[in-house]
Image (cartoon, grey):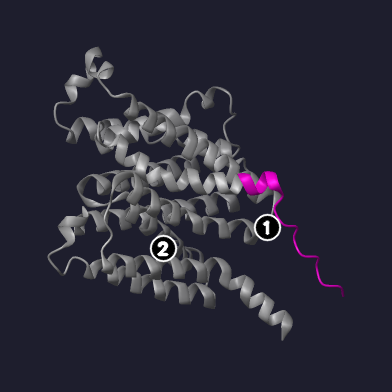
């Protein structure tokens, strides 16, 4: 029996699309910081999902699957992932480190997949989870000393960002369950229509927790919002969400996942550099150690299976 032909490399157009997604998602965290200068975390959540849903819901048909999946995904990804992340960035997390820590969703997804779906992690994933745990220990050690406050990070910010990563993993599991329940649903329609779900919860949380929310009922308050805040909300909704996920989904439809997934390794690199260059964020020695461990863990998970297959074929 002949061995299957290797998958074709990405052409120039798809390569450009993959690099565009890396940049869009890497800059995402700096843009969040800019938005949080004018909006509270819950207000930014409202703005993000208003831009992500409108006006696309007028042109994109609802996904052909049970609405419970849309509701669960919208709550877990929207209120969970971005609620925790926005609050974490506000109370004590830099954009640079958030871009790295959010990638631990890969390992939370593996844990949840094992617990809920019976999916056993392979050897590369096991090695990656060990390295990620070591990296998180390095991040925690940063707060054992006295210099953590100079970096703009707090233990609460670290915990909230990890909760955001765990919520992202939860949304991955929900998407996987939805795929099992209704194979072949439209991912873009799923993302657009699920973006409607977090809007009301974020409005209610803003009304309950934000100070002086009544001023947002006055037109002069809206007119005083800086253009950078509006641009940030539009970027988060249209560029990072709709365009980013649209391009990524298209790549996964045209190419095997093992050809596309390695590009995700560039997201924390872009986010780390953008946070340091655009915002002047500082990374301590312990945090650098954590970054290296988490990135190596991602390399194990993303590239490990390909290396294992090559070694098996050459044996």
Task: Name the residue tied to disc 1.
Answer: 256
Instruction: Let me know if residue 12 is in the magenta part.
Output: yes
Q: Nearer the viewer, mark 2 or mark 1?
A: 1
- Identify the residue shown where x is 16% and y is 69%: 144
Residue at the right extreme of this rendering: 1
What's the residue at 21%, 30% (across, down)?
207
Tell me the quarter of the image containing the C terminus. bottom right
Instruction: State the quadrant of the N terminus.
Output: bottom right
Occupied quadrant, residue 211: top left
- Kindly state the secondary structure of the residue where label 1 is placed: loop
Can you see residue 95? yes
Q: Residues within 10 Å of mark 2 (few under 14, many from 20)?
A: many
Q: x%, y% of residue 72? A: 43, 44
Q: Is residue 67 visible?
A: no
Outermost residue, bottom side: 315
On screen, 29 above or below 192? below
Q: Does 168 sit left or right of 187 as displayed? A: left
List the residue tagged with mark 2.
Answer: 108
Q: Nearer the viewer, residue 100 or 161?
A: 100
Magenta highlight range:
1-16
Side (left or right) of 40 relative to 65 = left
Marked residue nearer the N-terminal end (2 or 1): 2
In what element is the residue under mark 2? helix
| Image coordinates for residue 93, horizontal then vertical, percent | 26, 52
For residue 72, which numbered disc appears in the image? none
């Amino acid at each position: 029996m002949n061995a299957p032909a290797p998958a074709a490399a990405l052409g120039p157009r798809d390569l450009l699309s993959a690099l565009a997604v890396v940049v869009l998602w890497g800059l995402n965290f700096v843009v969040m910081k800019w938005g949080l200068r004018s909006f509270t975390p819950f207000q930014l959540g409202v703005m993000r999902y208003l831009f992500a849903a409108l006006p696309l819901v007028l042109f994109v048909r609802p996904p052909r699957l049970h609405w419970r999946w849309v509701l669960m995904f919208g709550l877990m990804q929207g209120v969970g992932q971005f609620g925790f992340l926005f609050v974490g960035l506000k109370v004590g997390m830099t954009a640079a480190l958030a871009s790295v820590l959010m990638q631990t969703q890969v390992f939370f997804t593996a844990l949840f997949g094992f617990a809920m779906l019976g999916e056993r992690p392979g050897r590369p994933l096991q090695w990656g989870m060990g390295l990620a745990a070591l990296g998180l220990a390095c991040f925690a050690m940063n707060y054992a000393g006295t210099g953590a406050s100079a970096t703009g990070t707090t233990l609460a910010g670290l915990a909230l960002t990890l909760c955001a990563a765990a919520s992202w993993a939860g949304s991955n599991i929900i998407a996987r369950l939805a795929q099992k329940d209704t194979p072949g649903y439209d991912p873009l329609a799923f993302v657009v229509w699920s973006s409607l779900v977090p809007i009301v919860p974020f409005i209610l949380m803003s009304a309950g927790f934000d100070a002086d929310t009544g001023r947002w009922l006055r037109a002069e308050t809206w007119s005083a919002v800086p253009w950078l805040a509006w641009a940030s909300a539009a970027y988060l909704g249209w560029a990072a969400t709709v365009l980013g996920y649209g391009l990524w989904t298209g790549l996964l439809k045209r190419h095997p996942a093992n050809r596309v997934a390695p590009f995700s390794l560039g997201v924390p690199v872009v986010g780390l550099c953008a946070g340091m260059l655009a915002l002047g964020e500082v990374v301590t020695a312990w945090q650098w150690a954590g970054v290296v461990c988490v990135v190596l863990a991602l390399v194990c998970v993303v590239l490990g299976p390909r290396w294992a297959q090559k070694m098996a074929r050459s044996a």
